[in-house]
Image (cartoon, coloured by chain):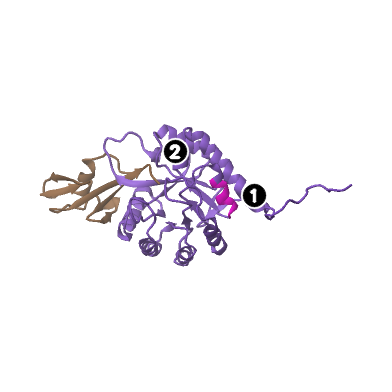
């Protein structure tokens, strides 16, 4: 499969993993290994002196690049501070920008997200914003200097798949930066569909970490992303209303 | 003086530094970042940044999420 390139950095895997929801670091480690991911998100939280083990050790052990996010932020100001703390703690200027509008839907707030994106780009960050499936906002964020756009398929953790494939296609058509389908993936066919629609990568967590067998679902997602990418590049046949015989009907 | 470290109030001696506040939680110096009253304090400045009364110190690290 061809490489994914974000901000000049190459990845041979087009599956970006999140780390939320895993029952243990051991299960997470096995799932990440099975997924083949090379880029994985972490959140920033108050240090817990009683915590055992660290997600950072898991990523380091698998040679996976860390992508800090701003999960839990409701304002641009909070997100900018969290990104700066992540840069200081983790030594990366990459950030998955996530500014949530409310706790019930966890939908991204477009106004706060755009404000934060402008400030973080100006501060030298490689910004990957999580957004609704809004082609206009995606274009504005690209113009503001974001390194990718990450439209949702459906609300975080919902497993509802891609609710508006048409909007995702519109975003893909117009984008000059990678489009990463983020949130809503429930099973492998959802990930394959994202790639068939033309997305450059898929980010998912819950679909794997809360599956009954996370490592097996991670392997399924890995295969689905490859299959979807190949199908996109192969060029699917047009849909027809009626049958078209694949062999001659008359001798 | 009174300072808040990760949401908990502490009585500390005058001249207490950010580095000392961090050490109340962890001996680690990597993978950790500090905000003092919502501004990042870079690691190189922890030892030389003294706290003031009513300061809010946040000590963060990476956890599973997203």
In the rendered view, does A78 fall on the left or right side of A163? left
Q: Residue at x 52, y 59 (%)?
A: A167
Give the answer, above or below, for where A226 lies relative to A7. Answer: above
Q: Position of residue A201 (x, y in %)?
A: 53, 51
| Chain A tint in image | purple
Give a yes or no on whether discs 2 and 1 share a subunit. yes
Whether residue A59 is visible here, answered yes or no, is: yes
Q: Quadrant of residue A137?
A: bottom left
Give the answer, above or below, for where A223 lies relative to A137. Answer: above
Which residue was labeled with disc 1? A231
Q: Residue at x 44, y 33 (%)?
A: A27
Whether residue B16 is visible here, answered yes or no, is: no
Q: Residue at x 17, y 48 (%)?
A: B4
In the rendered view, does A58 fall on the left or right side of B52? right
- The circle on residue A209 is 2
Please state which of residues A153 and A87 is positioned toward the viewer in this rendering.
A153
| Chain B tint in image | brown
Distance between the alpha carbons at the discs numbered 2 and 1:
26 Å
- The circle on residue A129 is none
Please state which of residues B46 and A164 is positioned toward the viewer in this rendering.
A164
Q: Position of residue A112 (x, y in %)?
A: 35, 62
Q: Secondary structure at mark 2?
A: helix
Q: Secondary structure at mark 1?
A: helix
- Mark 2 or 1 closer to N-term? 2
* Chain to which mark 1 belongs: A
User: Which span is picked out in magenta?
Assistant: A190-197
Please state which of residues A203 and A42 is positioned toward the viewer in this rendering.
A203
* Chain to which mark 2 belongs: A
């Amino acid at each position: 499969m061809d490489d994914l390139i974000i901000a000049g950095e190459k990845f041979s895997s087009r599956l970006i993993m999140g780390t939320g929801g895993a029952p243990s670091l051991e299960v997470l480690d096995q799932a990440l290994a099975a997924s083949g991911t090379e880029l994985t998100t972490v959140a920033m939280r108050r240090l817990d002196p009683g915590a055992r083990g660290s997600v950072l050790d898991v990523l380091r052990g698998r040679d996976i690049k860390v992508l800090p996010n701003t999960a839990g932020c409701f304002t641009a100001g909070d997100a900018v501070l969290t990104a700066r703390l992540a840069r200081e703690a983790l030594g990366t200027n990459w950030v998955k920008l996530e500014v949530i509008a409310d706790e019930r839907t966890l939908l991204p707030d477009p106004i706060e997200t755009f404000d934060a994106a402008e400030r973080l780009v100006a501060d030298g960050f490689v910004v990957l914003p999580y957004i609704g499936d809004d082609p206009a906002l995606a274009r504005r964020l690209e113009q503001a200097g974001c390194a990718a756009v990450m439209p949702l398929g459906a609300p975080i953790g919902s497993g509802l798949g891609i609710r508006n494939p048409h909007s995702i296609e519109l975003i893909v058509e117009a984008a000059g930066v990678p489009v990463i389908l983020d949130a809503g993936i429930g099973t492998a066919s959802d990930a394959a569909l994202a790639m068939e629609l033309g997305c450059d990568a898929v980010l998912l967590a819950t679909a794997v970490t809360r599956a009954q067998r996370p490592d097996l679902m991670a392997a399924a997602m890995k295969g689905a992303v490859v299959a979807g990418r190949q199908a996109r590049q192969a060029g699917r046949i047009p849909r027809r209303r009626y049958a078209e015989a694949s062999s001659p009907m008359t001798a | 003086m009174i300072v808040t470290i990760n949401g908990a109030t502490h009585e500390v001696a005058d001249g207490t530094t950010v580095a000392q506040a961090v050490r109340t939680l962890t001996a680690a110096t990597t993978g950790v970042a500090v905000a003092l009253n919502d501004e990042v304090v870079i690691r190189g400045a922890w030892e030389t940044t003294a706290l003031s009364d009513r300061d809010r110190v946040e000590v963060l690290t990476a956890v599973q999420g997203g």
